[in-house]
Amino acid sequence: MAGLDRLKESVKEAVEEQRGRLAEIARWLYENPELGSEEFKAAELLTRELEKHGFKVVRGLYDMPTAFYASYRGKGDGPRVAVIAEYDALPGVGHGCGHDLIAASAIGAGVATSKVAGELNGEVLVVGTPAEEGRGPSGGSKVIMGENGFWDDVDAAIMLHPSTSYSVGNRSLGIWNVSMEFRGQTSHAAASPHMGVNALNAATLAYMATHMLRQEARRDANLVIHGIISEGGQASNVIPDRAVVNFGVRSSDEEYLEEMVGKVARCGEGAAHAMGAEVEITKRKGYSGKKVNEPLVEVLWENYASLGAEMRPWKETIKGMPMASSDFGDVSRRIPAAGSYIKIAEPGTPGHSRQMADASVTVEGIEGMILGTKALAMTLVELLADPMKLERAKEYFVNH
Ligand SMILES: [Zn+2]
Ligand SMILES: [Zn+2]
């Protein structure tokens, strides 16, 4: 399709033209990090930028004041394709997850696509999704948006995330949070231990029992269990009457994950029973694991590859071990969605670190963001200009 190639060249140029401004946006966010659910300044900066480029902006979605979407309609009432922005930072390490670059890339890709919208049948959306790291009332905003039907009116969604290498099509893990609150009886730890019920002992037993589950875990399901004892008494001479254990349970298999959450809860119940304590167990679903959409992954991968990004073939990446969890997984369970990683730092740089935050504003960081922004814009254009591609993604979504 010669027409499509020309459109792709146009959006690449449009991204180049924004290079300085996108770097400025990233640096501003880097220098003014805001925690999840409090990204007021970031949301203001990003929505103003989109308005400046003629987008229609809706600020605040489903009682989440820092969520937004911005739309730009081309000719005709064709499909709606979305690029997703995140802009929450982390306590202590600022933009240690590089969401400053996710925000800049979404603005860049959306604006670039809008420049050729006159030739496209459909609409491009930039969707602002706060609190990806889960903090505050807007925590996991993409899940909340899904529950309210937001994604039902969107045909496909794409995004990028900073990393130490380029890749497209990575899976992610589903996660549940299990909290156990043990109740016992205080008593003098030396003079009258026989009158106490030690809640910390019950919590410790639950912690150990959960560890022991691991041996029998299914090896193909990428099970991860991580936990802390967040409360365990206040003085060593008082038998604790209260202890709290918090677990994260993750897996790439959603059904198996629920089964294992049940078993972790059983460890808590068993431990309470053994010690004669009471326990209240709260099981809360966090994020879903990503549902890979092969046709969409292929389109996005091809666009990255055409820009010279060094990557494994996507067919290998989708089989790779999923490492973390994101509420983008929940988007992928509702509509065709594909994510990508850009290289902003050398391999070995830890995620959620000061080093990763600093990398986001280096020459390499900005270069990676610009490359990724072009790939996102080219993909948005491709989905609108070549309806068969979007059809294939939708068919695949329904059948898998
Ligand atoms: Zn993160
Ligand atoms: Zn992140």
Image (cartoon, rainbow, N blue to C red):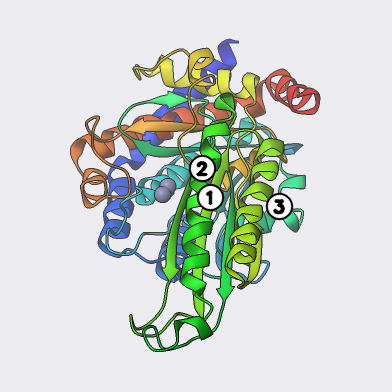
Task: Give the residue at mark 2.
Answer: 212
Q: Residue at x 43, y 68 (%)?
A: 230
Q: Does 73 sit left or right of 354 as displayed? A: right
Q: Mark 2 to mark 1: distance in Å?
A: 5 Å
Location of residue 138 with respect to 87 vertically, above or below: below
Please identify the quadrant where the C terminus is shown: top right
Q: Does 394 sit left or right of 288 as displayed? A: right
Q: Nearer the viewer, residue 52 or 137?
A: 137
Would you say the beta carbon of the disc 2 residue lies within 8 angstroms of ligand 1? Answer: no
Q: Nearer the viewer, residue 180 or 154?
A: 180
Could you say where residue 180 lies in the image, as x and y percent from the top left?
A: 58, 65
Q: Residue at x 50, y 82 (%)?
A: 194
Query: Would residue 69 be seen by someone viewing this image from the given angle?
Result: no
Task: Give the residue at mark 3.
Answer: 146
Mark with earlier residue (3, 2)? 3
Amino acid type for the residue under numbered disc 1: Ala
Q: Which tag is nearer the camera, tag 3 or tag 1?
A: 1
Q: Mark 3 to mark 2: distance in Å?
A: 36 Å
Task: Give the residue at mark 1.
Answer: 209
Q: Residue at x 64, y 43 (%)?
A: 260
Q: Mark 3 to mark 1: distance in Å?
A: 35 Å
In terms of image quadrants, where is residue 28? bottom left
Q: Are marks 2 and 1 in contact (CB under 8 Å)?
A: yes
Amino acid type for the residue under numbered disc 3: Gly
Q: Residue at x 71, y 43 (%)?
A: 154
Q: Which tag is nearer the camera, tag 3 or tag 2?
A: 2
Q: Secondary structure at mark 3?
A: helix
